[in-house]
Amino acid sequence: MNDTSRRSFLKGAGATALGASVLPFLKVLPASAASGDVVVAVTGQTINSLDIHRTGTNRPSYQVAVNVYDRLVSFGTKTLADGSLSYDYSVIEPEVAESWEFADDGMAIVFKLRPEGKFQDGSPITAADVKWSFDRAVSVGGFPTVQMKAGSLEKPEQFEAIDDLTFKINLLRKSKLTLPDLAVPVPMIINSKVALANATEEDPWAMEYLHKTPAGSGAFKVATWKPGEQLVYERNDDWTSGPLPAVKRVVLREVPSPATRRALLERGDVNMSFNMPNKDAKELSDLDGITVATTPIENSIYCLCPNLAFEPFKDKRVRQAIAFAVPYDEVFQTAAYGRGAPMWGGENATPTDISWPQKFPYSTDLEKAKVLLEEAGYGDGFEVPLSISLSQADWMEPTALLIQENLAKIGITATIEKVPGANWRTASLVEKRLPLHLETFGGWLNYPCYYFFWAYLEGHLFNSSNYRNEEIEALTAETLHMSVEDPEYAPKIKRMIEIVWDEVPRIALWQPALNVGTHDVSGYEYWFHRQLDIRGLKKA
Amino acid sequence: MLPDRFLTIGLRIAQAIPVIFGVIVVSFILTRALPGDPAVYFAGAAADEASIAEVRSALGLDKSLPAQFWIYLTDLASGDLGQSISTGQSVASDLATRLPASLELTLISLVLSCSIAIPLGVLAATRPGSAVDHLCRVLVTAGVSLPTFFTGVVLIYVFYYLLGIAPSPLGRLDFIYIEPDQVTGFYLIDAAIAGDWETWTGALKQLVLPAITLALFTLAPLARMTRAAMLSALSSDYVRTARAAGLTEEKVLSTYAFRNALLPVVTTLGMVFSFTLGANVLVEKVFAWPGIGSYAVEALVVSDYAAVQGFVLAMALLFVALNLVIDLTYTMIDPRIGFQTK
């Protein structure tokens, strides 16, 4: 194919098949001039692997698992109050599986696969592929294995291929988390025939091959991938797991500078800026032609964490004093430009419902803070380092400065300690050795008990405060797998929330938001994984 | 004479071997001294202790330092620079795509800044106190006082955002062009080889703004050095003698003064080249340029050992080559400087 025909192909006319020989194309018309089926998006982050199961695969890469692979099931879609779209965690929809049912004793789920289901190379999707993919996810270790475990999917013996189109999961326990966990990006279904043909003795799970060459059945194929530059998606016209997407190609360019991304969107040279800074989102939301979707990230809170391993914070009154000393509104306006949801100023000390996150019953009250410190015997204050991560300095630095200022007013001298990004996880989450620090956790499975499991149980990764409360330990274990419909569920959750409100090992600041700016494109949908799902996009 | 020179060049290259080995040792030790635990970082958001341990052994980080160093050396001997975890590619292939991108940008900007700075410096030196001299001073002051990222953002704002005459700052090629088949990795050369002048023009257009940004930054030392060297050459005895001998002003300037002034300019050029390669990180970020500078910084931030070591090694090799080229250029400018004396 010569250049002219390659070009005309990209303009939407001419050639019909995209052979491997034309894959290294860069060319797609600028958004303003492009035909209706090409979307150009920019993002600030690098996609470093096409395989979510690989060690070291970073968060921005998860979107490949979403767009290029299918899962057994998916979540539904709902319209939020502001008119933007969001996934709906209360609805589980078929994807590769056509239907599913629980065994009579509730200890197994049997999935019927779509008979017409096929991979991008045309081969049928069989239960053996599903089993191989799930075996891989629970065996390779690291993040995929941890995420599978959250749904009580722990070992290969649990998975059975009954026949070509019937797949069975034997459950270790009854859990409300199992089915939703099948809809997260990790349990993607891989074409095992292709993968096995490229596996070696040292690499039985074909990690090296799938890292660069996806073998899925999803709505899009990867046409080109140049790490650090761009990824081009090409529609899979034979997609069997859902309605055919409206756009044919999506070009995702990596543009590190937020100022450049903003200029590109404002000029209309790109259709979408994914994960914009709050400041740009605020300023661009009033512009004609640009739509900014700001969605509070579900099950996620930015927190100030006093560490109970350190003397002053062992006393709950000191933690409460700090919770009353935070200048919440200033922090929210300065560090988040008012985007997201406030998590302070709750009216009751006991929760009225089980929504999570919900407003904590603290607001700025320096007098109350002083009294509490006095009662705890710290009336003269104390000194403490306030740690922040340099890789999250955009929100942590202004937040820490404002908190430092107010802590000084109640006699606490906080010195801001900046920890290099590469060291942050080790210091805050693994060793849990930071006395007072900012931290965040967002749970993929949207249940309060799931948040508690990760953030409030002793020794668990995101409990960087070294908090332990016997009642919370017991209640979390009881509620984690319990059905939400169970009459005991709500009272127990309320009790859990009440306890952590009172003891505040994590002081909630605000619920962060994901900002996405679009120009001439509709159909953007927010997902809990905070990655771009391109399947629903439409050119205006 | 000639075989003699090749022998000395060979000797110079041989002298570089201990330097390179030193760089390998030092970069290995220094990367291990970086803060942070790559195993924890790369194990991902929800990793527990067991999975961190798995990652550690997968990355070979559970072995002793000498053992890790030995593995690194044997890999290196077979041309394997290791895997970068942050980009997910082999370091060798990362360097092969990113180094030409940075070099192309740096070289173009140096050509641009030399073609302005050297004549400007000469003119300023021959007409001290004139308007040209003042212009030179203004440019030099502006060049050193404007940080590159600021110049870059301003240029984008004016020429792309406001006027719309510059192409979108989207890296080496806009969407409308097809990347030329890789031969040298320099898009201008590769496109010319392929005879694809449309892409050639496209690549050139993308180069204009970042090259001007960097050129403004490198202009200052070059212009200053040219002016100073020319001034001292012009006040020297041999120029006075040449003038007294009745040579034309043109001959005096080009042959006697300029040639002698070139030596410090070339020295400065060598230094400017090396720090530009390092300093264009911010320009690369602003223009989404997939170069080596942003690569190295990203790698450092996440303690990506293989990538940092590969970068340091590539730079060491480059500078050894650069120094050799500069030495050879000296002998061409001034035949009195020979290798024989060393």
Image (spheres, coloured by chain):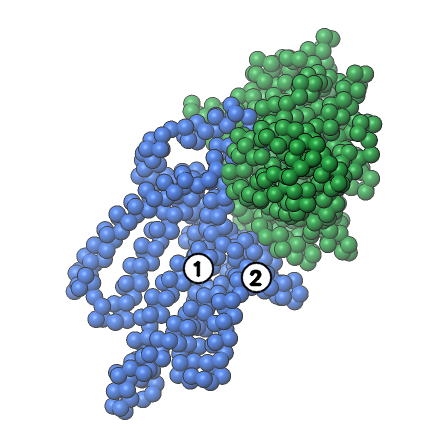
Chain colours: A green, B blue
Q: CA distance from mark 2 to mark 1?
A: 16 Å
The residue tagged 1 is B276
Percent coordinates x, y for residue A406 in the rendering:
68, 45
> Circle 2 sits in a helix, a strand or a loop, which is it?
helix
Residue at coordinates 41% horizontally, 28% vertically from top-left?
Answer: B62
Q: Which mark is residue B150?
A: 2
Q: Is residue A351 left or right of residue A12?
A: right
A453 and B337: which is toward the camera: A453
**CA neighbours of label 1 inside 10 A, class few (<14), some (14 to 19), many (20+):** many
Residue at coordinates 34% horizontally, 51% vertically from top-left?
Answer: B317
Amino acid tagged 1: Thr
Amino acid tagged 2: Phe
- Count all numbered tags in the image, as a single digit: 2
B75 and A499: which is toward the camera: A499
Q: Is residue A491 left or right of residue B127?
A: right
Would residue A266 be visible to someone looking at this image? yes
Percent coordinates x, y for residue B94 in the rendering:
45, 45
Quadrant of res A433: top right
> Circle 1 sits in a helix, a strand or a loop, which is it?
helix
